[in-house]
């Protein structure tokens, strides 16, 4: 993380997908992501909804992250890979929101994930 960041570290934070142009998000079992961050590196995993399991790795500069990802689809076991860029924002109640721009199926996509409030 650089000094230009206004959003705190993502280290150990959980996020749930709330919308996606790739698929309809299942509100009961949305994809859930766990992020780790250290010295400008980002990594983590995700599962749920249409994804059996997935992994990502990337970097953070300021309030933007870039990741490469791979996941396996629940429907047919297809392995999907890609790259994406996310802007980090704050929700009205102070949680972190990820606005993710990526390419999948040779088309630009957009998804939004929001931090899961601490219990």
Image (spheres, rainbow, N blue to C red):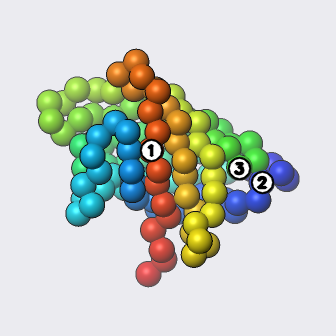
Residue drawn at (74%, 42%), measured in percent from left and top? Answer: 61
- Quarter of the picture containing the C terminus is bottom left
What residue sits right under mark 2 in the picture?
5
**Looking at the picture, does residue 117 appear above or below residue 60?**
below
Mark 2 Cα-neighbour bin, 10 Å: few <14, some 14–19, many ≥20: some
What residue sits right under mark 3 in the picture?
63
- Of labels 1 and 3, earlier in sequence is 3
Q: Nearer the viewer, residue 108 or 15?
A: 108
**Number of residue marks:** 3
- Of labels 2 and 3, earlier in sequence is 2
Left or right side of 22 for 102? right
| Percent x, y of residue 39 | 73, 47
- Asked if the residue at tag 3 contacts the one at tag 2, i.e. Cβ–Cβ closer than 8 Å, the answer is yes
Residue drawn at (67%, 44%), measured in percent from left and top? Answer: 64
Mark 1 Cα-neighbour bin, 10 Å: few <14, some 14–19, many ≥20: some
- Nearer the observer: mark 2 or 1; the answer is 1
Residue drawn at (63%, 42%), measured in percent from left and top? Answer: 65
Is label 1 in a helix, a strand or a loop?
strand
Q: Residue furthest right?
A: 3
Residue 68 seen in the figure: no
The alpha-carbon separation of the residues under discs 2 and 1 comes to 21 Å
Left or right side of 113 for 52? left
| Percent x, y of residue 72 | 27, 34
Mark 3 Cα-neighbour bin, 10 Å: few <14, some 14–19, many ≥20: some
- Asked if the residue at tag 3 contacts the one at tag 1, i.e. Cβ–Cβ closer than 8 Å, the answer is no
Q: Residue furthest top?
A: 106
Is label 3 in a helix, a strand or a loop?
loop
Left or right side of 108 for 25? left
- Asked if the residue at tag 1 contacts the one at tag 2, i.e. Cβ–Cβ closer than 8 Å, the answer is no
What residue sits right under mark 1 in the picture?
111
């Amino acid at each position: 993380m650089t000094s230009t960041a206004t959003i705190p570290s993502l280290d150990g934070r959980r996020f749930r997908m709330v919308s996606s142009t790739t698929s309809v998000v299942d509100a009961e079992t949305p994809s859930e992501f766990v992020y780790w961050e250290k010295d400008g590196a980002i990594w983590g995993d995700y599962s749920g909804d249409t994804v059996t399991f997935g992994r990502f790795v990337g970097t953070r500069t300021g309030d933007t992250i870039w990741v490469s990802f791979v996941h396996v689809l629940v429907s047919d076991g297809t392995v999907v890979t890609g790259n994406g860029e996310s802007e980090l924002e704050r929700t009205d109640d102070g949680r972190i929101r990820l606005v993710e721009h990526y390419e999948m199926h040779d088309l630009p996509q957009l998804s939004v994930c929001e931090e899961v409030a601490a219990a």
